[in-house]
Image: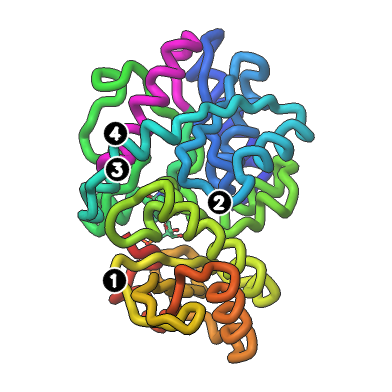
Amino acid sequence: MDAKNFVEERIAEIKSTVGEGRAISALSGGVDSSACTVLAHRAIGQNLKSIFIDDGLMRENEPQDVQRIFGDLGIKVDIVDAGSEFFKTLKGKDDPEEKRKAFRNTFYSVFGREVKKSVSRFLIQGTIKADIIETEGGIKTQHNILEQIGIDPEEGYGFKVIEPVKDLFKPQVREVAAEVGLPEEISQRMPFPGPGLATRIVGEVTEERVALLRKATVIVEDEIAVLKPFQAFAVLLSDKGTGIVESEREFGDIIIVRSVESQDAMTAQPTQVPWDILMKVTERITTELPKVVRVAYELTPKPPATIEYV
Ligand code: XMP
């Protein structure tokens, strides 16, 4: 792929599709939606409204960081605070696909509302090829895949979807992101799933459980960053284990540390994390998060496991 040509072609395509109309971009701060947002901004300028839905399932400071990075590029990002809607819809659900579907429906209803408010008729989205292949293959329900699974977004939600990077895999999207001038902080960013920390919580997703996982995530990302893994993160299990907290037996939480190496996320191998790093992660998690009494490192490649847990 010639990234420069690709960028020019997509900009021209977005321009001709949207015309004088308005479009809204579903920006998550990941490399896919970030590249798409810059492409669309170049194509239609002020007629693009970039929205970051804060679903309450993001990592520490993520909404503010994204707003700042895009602000530096001259692109204004509106944060829509929708956390309570997502927690309401996820309440009581522990089945993975039910959680994904609940997330997807809420995501589109919040977004549909914003699109209508902004009189946009088009939604720019960062769907990539792996998302489409895996959803068509029945491996999972991605949240951003309406058209591919036969749901008409115009009929159901009132807008048309434009997916500028849907024919690319992740490494090519990174090239496009660099080509359009996004900083490395974004172009080389680890993938983070649309449904956010919900894909790393086994069992019910509650505000309290997300808060715990968010803190564990900071520790894992910090400590494993030196290895530059494809993805590294924490997972909260629904099982519990016995531990000792302040000399008392405590039936506490279990955190799984997962770090993988991959090219395109279709297959993955566990990172060979040095023992001292694993021990440091374990010590920090159990000290900084006393409710967690056990930490384990995940060794399963994809396949048979997926990268995320839900
Ligand atoms: P899995 O867990 O299926 O993940 O092996 C493959 C890659 O996709 C990311 N992922 C998602 N990305 N929406 C996304 O935008 C999703 O629903 C979703 N689920 C998984 C995951 O982080 C990994 O990079």
Secondary-structure class at tag 1: strand
**Mark 2 lies on residue:** 59
Decide whether residue 74 is among the magenta residues.
Answer: no
Of callouts 1 and 3, which one flags the residue occurring earlier in the amino acid sequence? 3
Between 49 and 216, the residue placed more toward the observer is 216
Marked residue nearer the N-terminal end (4 or 3): 3
> Residue 301: horizontal and vertical position, in percent?
38, 79
Q: Give the range drawn in magenta.
A: 101-123
Q: Mark 3 points at which residue?
A: 90
Tag 2 or tag 3, which sits nearer the N-term?
A: 2
* Residue at screen point 36% across, 39% down: 87
Q: In this view, does 249 lie to the left or right of 179?
A: left
Q: What amino acid type should be assigned to the residue bearing mark 4?
A: Asn
Distance between mark 1 and mark 3 Cα atoms: 19 Å
Question: What's under tag 2, amino acid-wise?
Answer: Arg
The span from disc 4 to disc 1 (Cα, nearest Å) is 28 Å
